[in-house]
Amino acid sequence: MYLLKYTYSSLIFFIFFGQLYSQNPISIKDSLNIMKVMDFQEKAWNNGDIDSFMNGYLRSEELVFSGSNGPIYGWNATKERYKRSYPDLKTMGKLSFTVNKIKSLSKNTAYLIGEYYLKRTIEDSYGHFTLIWKKVNGKWLIVSDHTSSSN
């Protein structure tokens, strides 16, 4: 399975044409800032650094992660869930994101729909996610993550 990786130039093209046909356009600047967080998270994950990966999430009890076992509330609980589920580099594998859609919900909120792929020496994992983002002090952070595995 090959994943399309967006470069900044192709992302700008995607966002520009997406805004032409979108009822809820998001600025190119905000889209790029969200994509920078996604890129940072991908790199942190691939370095085995869950603590840094968590910097993309709102550090609050407001954060909710929903997966196959139901919702988990709060930044600390979400981090502990990741650490339990992915205790080592072998389990973590190499993460790739594909972003399918980014739309604005309001001036300071957006949603992103995408796919993840974990390439591992053990069974690979892939699935879909929907992220709700909130701009806090000029920085985009995830406030809700609904991720489901397809395997």
Image (cartoon, rainbow, N blue to C red):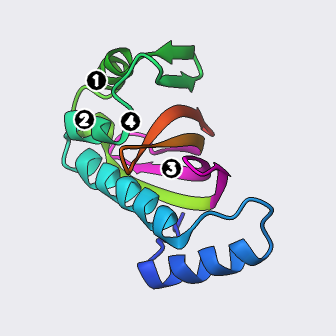
Residue 132 x/y as whole percent? 57, 40
Q: Determine which of the numbered discs, if any, sits on residue 83 in the image.
A: 1
For label 2, the residue is 50
Q: Quadrant of residue 75?
A: top left
Q: Determine which of the numbered discs, if any, sits on residue 116 in the image.
A: 3
Q: Determine which of the numbered discs, if any, sits on residue 14 in the image.
A: none
Q: Quadrant of residue 137?
A: top left
The reply to whether dot 4 and dot 1 touch (C-beta < 8 Å) is no
Up-down relation of residue 74 to residue 113 (above or below): above
The reply to whether dot 4 and dot 2 touch (C-beta < 8 Å) is no
Identity of the amino acid at label 2? Ile
Q: Is residue 104 left or right of residue 145?
A: right
- Of labels 4 and 2, earlier in sequence is 2
Judging depth in this view, the residue of 87 and 60 nearest the camera is 60
The N terminus appears in which quarter of the rendering?
A: bottom right
- Of labels 2 and 3, earlier in sequence is 2
The C terminus appears in which quarter of the rendering?
A: top right
123 part of magenta stretch = yes
Q: Determine which of the numbered discs, if any, sits on residue 57 in the image.
A: 4
Q: Residues within 10 Å of mark 3 (few under 14, many from 20)?
A: many
- Of labels 4 and 3, earlier in sequence is 4
Mark 3 to mark 1 CA distance (whole Å): 18 Å
Identity of the amino acid at label 3? Tyr
Mark 4 to mark 3 CA distance (whole Å): 17 Å
Range of residues picked out in magenta: 101-128
The total of numbered circles placed on residues is: 4
Mark 4 to mark 2 CA distance (whole Å): 11 Å
Regarding mark 4 in the picture, which secondary structure is present there?
loop
Identity of the amino acid at label 1? Lys
Q: Quadrant of residue 13?
A: bottom right
